[in-house]
Image: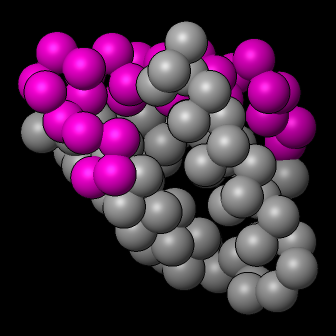
Amino acid sequence: MVSETITLLGDDCMESHARRDRVTEDQWRVCLRAICDEAHASGVPPERLLRELKEAIRRLCDARAIARGPGRTEFTSRIVTMCIEEYFA
């Protein structure tokens, strides 16, 4: 299921982000590309994928005590934008 993949792949990237390591855009794109590939293979529409991705990001940020605010909003927006780009690539 897409949500499981989002959690597993996003967890690796988020873990690095939470440790204050720099996760490059290329590293995020690798994770997101795998998620989008699975979504395409499973016939998951982009609306559902984005809904699940946003929920997964929210849960991961909460679990790692990443504070709500402009930084978290910008982070979420950037990941969502990259996911859209990868889904339609």
Where is 75 relative to 12, above or below?
A: below
Q: Kindly identify the residue that appears in the image at 38 percent across and 25 percent down.
A: 36
Q: Position of residue 61 (x, y in %)?
A: 59, 70
Where is 88 relative to 60, above or below?
A: above
Q: Position of residue 50 (x, y in %)?
A: 42, 52
- The answer to if 33 sits in the magenta stretch is yes
Q: Kindly identify the residue that appears in the image at 11 percent across and 25 percent down.
A: 42
Instruction: Report the side of 59 relative to 12 (left or right).
Output: left
In depth, the one of 40 and 72 nearer the eye is: 40
Q: Quadrant of the C terminus?
A: top right
Q: Kindly identify the residue that appears in the image at 51 percent across and 72 percent down.
A: 58
Q: Position of residue 38 (x, y in %)?
A: 25, 21
Q: Where is residue 16, by image quadrant?
A: top right
Is residue 56 visible from the viewing direction of this image? no
| Range of residues picked out in magenta | 21-48
Instruction: Report the side of 78 relative to 59 (left or right).
Output: right
Q: Quadrant of the N terminus?
A: top left
- The answer to if 45 sits in the magenta stretch is yes
Where is 9 relative to 49, above or below?
A: above
In depth, the one of 54 and 6 nearer the eye is: 54
Instruction: Report the side of 37 relative to 20 (left or right).
Output: left
Q: Kindly identify the residue that appears in the image at 25 percent across and 28 percent down.
A: 39
Q: Main secondary structure of the magenta part?
A: helix
Total number of numbered discs in the rendering: 0
Furthest toward the bottom, the residue is 68
Q: Position of residue 2 (x, y in %)?
A: 22, 40
In depth, the one of 45 and 34 nearer the eye is: 45
Is residue 40 visible from the viewing direction of this image? yes
Where is 9 relative to 19, above or below?
A: above
